[in-house]
Image (tube, rainbow, N blue to C red):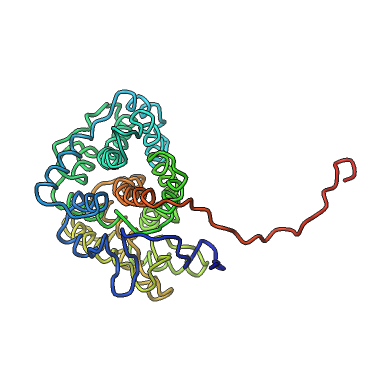
């Protein structure tokens, strides 16, 4: 049996999947065989969601029907709204989504009439609704209508956040980011979802666990940490000095490197180009320049490349998305990949139960309390 001497299951094959290739020589990143570059250039998030959940690209009529199906499912029930209204405003938005997902599982449980495909689509449709209903309620006191006429998930999210239809540049930038974040093989949150699914609980349990795994700064929270870092610097020169100080002190610079990719993250160049478009459109002379300098210093000093999270941070910031919303927006996208993996795990299930190398004490004689 193969063992992982480095920790974290690095390099260990933990199962089979037909959903994505990540870092495979000659293939790069693909979703069900389709290049991430082609999908980001020509597709939409809804088309990718359909591909992941149903296993094939939709026809034109299927995509129109699917988008309408999602649009109709954006509404929230009164009991769910009541729970969201009880969550304190100081709560991290990821905890809001974790709680909302779990509650939805009690209100709309999985059964023969409401199967795994229906739940996957319902969550894809309403994660933005749950998040932004809470956000608007705790910040403005308004009980918003979470149904909008926007035919895209990106447009719906931005509309609920800002209270108006978004401009097309921001809508498409967020749409592309959702495509890039949708799926990434056996990452921590997806493997968590598959592990939970392997015990045969309901669909919501696996998704709720995945949200918990994505919450951490070493996974989904990296984009938030990247933004917090970038905001510390006013000029590229300040950024260079600050990053040199951090690397000299062996501090972790979030948004760089990847456990799978060794040369570059194929998603990074795509989102960087969108960050540049947004910066130019807004006349930004600071944030994008600071980001580029950080990238240059990290390449020069540590031979490290930016991952998807790094330029996603500035792209989201240019679209007026609060930093605390970055990782929840990841959930809005990744639910499609999680769903695909839960469905795949269930189709050929074996309980996921790895072994561990014991490094504790050798067998010892128990000494009764009176003799210690």
Q: Is residue 279 above or below residue 249?
A: above
Q: Residue furthest left?
A: 61
Left/right placement of residue 232 relative to residue 282 reads right
Q: Residue furthest right?
A: 371
Give the camera-side residue of 10 and 221: 10
Residue 207 horizontal/vertical position (percent):
39, 43
Question: Is residue 234 in view from this perspective?
Answer: no
Residue 247 horizontal/vertical position (percent):
47, 68
Residue 82 horizontal/vertical position (percent):
35, 24
Residue displayed at 27% across by 26% down: 143
Question: Is residue 304 in view from this perspective?
Answer: yes
Residue displayed at 18% across by 34% down: 72
Total numbered labels placed on residues in the image: 0
Give the camera-side residue of 18 and 308: 18
Residue 141 horizontal/vertical position (percent):
30, 26
The image quarter in which residue 90 lies: top left
The image quarter in which residue 362 lies: bottom right
Give the camera-side residue of 287 and 119: 119
Residue displayed at 29% across by 34% down: 114
The image quarter in which residue 258 lies: bottom left
Q: Quadrant of the N terminus?
A: bottom right
């Amino acid at each position: 049996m193969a063992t992982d001497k480095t920790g974290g299951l690095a390099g260990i094959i933990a199962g089979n999947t037909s959903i994505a290739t990540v870092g495979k020589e000659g293939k790069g990143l693909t979703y069900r065989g389709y290049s991430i570059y082609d999908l980001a250039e020509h597709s939409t998030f809804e088309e990718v969601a359909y591909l992941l959940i149903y296993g094939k690209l939709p026809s034109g009529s299927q995509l129109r029907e699917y988008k309408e199906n999602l649009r109709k499912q954006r509404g929230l029930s009164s009991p769910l709204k009541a729970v969201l209204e009880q969550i304190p405003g100081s709560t991290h938005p990821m905890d809001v989504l974790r709680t909302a997902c779990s509650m939805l599982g009690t209100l709309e449980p999985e059964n023969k009439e409401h199967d795994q495909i229906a739940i996957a689509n319902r969550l894809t449709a309403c994660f933005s609704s749950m998040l932004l209903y809470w956000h608007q309620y705790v910040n403005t006191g308004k009980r918003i209508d979470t149904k909008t006429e926007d035919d895209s998930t990106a447009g719906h999210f931005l509309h609920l956040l800002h209270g108006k239809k978004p401009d097309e540049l921001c809508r498409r930038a967020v749409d592309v980011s959702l495509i890039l974040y949708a799926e990434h093989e056996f990452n921590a949150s997806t493997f968590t979802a598959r592990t939970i699914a392997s015990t045969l609980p309901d669909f919501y349990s696996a998704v709720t666990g995945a949200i918990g795994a994505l919450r951490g700064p070493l996974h989904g929270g990296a984009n938030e940490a990247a933004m917090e870092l970038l905001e510390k610097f006013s000029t590229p020169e300040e950024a260079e000095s600050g990053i040199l100080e951090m690397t000299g002190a062996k501090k972790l610079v979030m948004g760089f490197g990847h456990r799978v990719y060794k040369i570059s993250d194929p998603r990074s160049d795509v989102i960087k180009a969108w960050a540049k478009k947004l910066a130019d459109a807004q006349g930004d002379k600071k944030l994008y320049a600071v980001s580029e300098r950080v990238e240059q210093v990290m390449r020069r000093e540590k031979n490290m490349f930016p991952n998807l999270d790094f330029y996603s941070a500035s792209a989201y910031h240019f679209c007026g998305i609060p930093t605390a919303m970055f990782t929840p927006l990841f959930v809005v996208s990744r639910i499609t990949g999680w769903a695909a993996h839960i469905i795949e795990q269930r189709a050929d299930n074996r309980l996921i139960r790895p072994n561990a190398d014991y490094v504790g004490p050798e067998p010892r004689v128990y000494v009764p309390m009176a003799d210690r």
